Image (cartoon, rainbow, N blue to C red):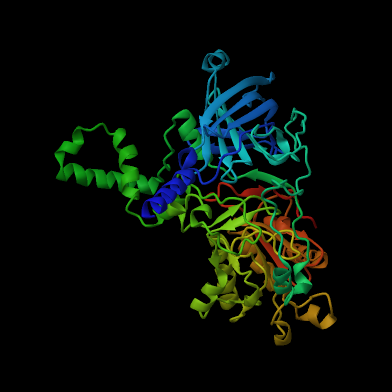
Amino acid sequence: MERKILLSIMMAFLVSCSQGGFVEPIASTISKPETTYIPVMPTKTRVGQYDVFDGVSSISNLVLKVDGDKAETSLTGIVTIQPVDGDQIALKVPINVVGTISPDDFTSYMFVQNQAELDSLQVKAGAKLTCMYTDCSESFIDIYVVYKGRAYHHQVESTDKMIVKPNPSAKDEDSQVEEDSDDQGGKQSSTPDKPKVKKKTKPTPTPTPEEEEKLDEEGSEFEHDDDGGGELGAYVGEPERDIEVLFQVAPSTPTPTPKEDKKEEEKKDEKKDDKKSNSQQPAPVNPKKDEPKKEEPKKPEPKKEEPKKPVTPVVPKPPIKPDVPSKNPDNVSVGRKILNTISQAIGDNGTGRLENAVSLLKFQKDNDNSGYNIMYPKRETYYGTTDMLNMMAHIGQYSQKKVNGYIISVGDVSKKNGGKLGGHSSHRRGLDADISYYFDNNSFQKGFTNVMASSSAKRSWMSDTQWDLFKSLVETSNVDRIFTDSNMKREFCQIAARNKEVGSSKDGVPFETLRALVPWKGHANHFHLRLKCSKGQPRCRQMAPPARATGC
């Protein structure tokens, strides 16, 4: 009997460790990826030793193949770049790259198979596939082309609806195979806000009647605000790591300031006096080798570098009841052993999810002077990313110090595992929060008060103080948008004009604050704060930037 039990345990272990340790089988698919986002104007970002350009490339005939049995990936097609060095002729670069999906972080670095062909064009190329789920049924791919010392980046995504040939062994007779047209111009062929199509075997989770009843117990007047508007942008990815791996380029080191140069020289002189052997080393080599070693002991550095570690957490498609723990703990998350303290906003604002969430309620209880109050703790919608917690702490401290100990009210943020929340279109990733406005009348300070509902409420609304708070939030560079009422946005425009804060130039904190303030129905009794994805959240999809205008 004992031998039978032991044998069954071993068989279960072997099944769980199939495909080289993958949590669940990888789907074998052939798909035609589409461009995620093209910026309105070309952008340039310094990454490592390269200037990386976005918005000057397009794709055609792109085909992604995933071999689930071997965990191998391949990408073929054409990437056309428009060189930024003055060349008028667009360069068509044939892409033929292959790679293997890592069971550690579910990414696949794909290297070229047609190097001789690329050498004739004097270009280098490579790509990285990042799985959104552990079965890799959905993914995004960052493609890089290096030409004349510059790097050109183009990002595409592969979703269920782009599959043109499913796994031949799939038993789902109802699955449909559709041919999608090539993305010749690099534009999105689908509506940005349309939710991604999920597999029938793993449907998008919907709240049970009991969950709906719990969500509607309190706060129903502000939960159905349909605040998910806006065009989707690109996934964050890991460009610095990608360039380093694909092209074997050493990571860039920060250039020291003149003051740091003097300190370095003084330290070198002291070392030369103490150890004459150091003087035999070439002077130009020492600064590059010594700088990283001197920065390592500093405590802030590991925190900044931690999100850039190779392994990033991925969770499988959530079950029907996301708040109920999985029976198999190993199937809850991937990479948690390494990044178990890093919160992750995954996907876009309309279909995303949250992992390793932090509790804003716990912070409130642990800190008497947090400066904010969770309105409906029974709803358990007070979870967010670490960035959201830091931002709420910022708002709380600002209110305590600048508004005479004011305590703001906080409504919905996200559920612990993210996902669909009541009637909200967003609030799925821990990057959205509903927050009360400032009032100088005590009777309006508890909960959410509609500024436009009465003349007394409007008179009590501290519009100038509100404007100052918004500027302080935008100044952190972490704010994506702030949804507010259209009449209140008009008031902020008048304040900025009265204070002569916005001139003809399109820059500065006041300009960026007005740019971030988006009028949206249903936000007269609270403002909706949405944060940007951070660099430590590679699978988080940004919103496209708002129009470069004040909107006044």
Number of residue marks: 0
Q: Is residue 158 visible in this depiction of the protein?
A: yes
Left or right of residue 259: residue 442: right
Residue 195, x across and y down, in percent: 74, 49
Q: Is residue 47 visible in this depiction of the protein?
A: no
Which residue of the protein is positioned furthest toward the front in this rendering?
1
Which image quarter: residue 319? bottom right
Residue 504, x across and y down, in percent: 74, 51
- Quadrant containing the C terminus is bottom right
**Residue placed at 62% from the left, 55% from the top?**
318
Left or right of residue 381: residue 338: left
Which image quarter: residue 513? bottom right
Residue 384, x across and y down, in percent: 58, 63
- Quadrant containing the N terminus is bottom left
Q: Nearer the viewer, residue 280 or 165?
A: 165
**Residue placed at 30% from the left, 33% from the top?**
285
**Residue placed at 69% from the left, 28% from the top?**
59
Q: Nearer the viewer, residue 390 or 507?
A: 390
Which residue of the protein is positioned furthest toward the bottom in this rendering?
443
Residue 456, x across and y down, in percent: 81, 83
Q: Is 56 rendered above or below residue 24?
A: above
Which image quarter: residue 31? top right
Q: Is 346 rendered above or below residue 113?
A: below
Left or right of residue 475: residue 519: right
Q: Nearer the viewer, residue 474 or 274?
A: 474
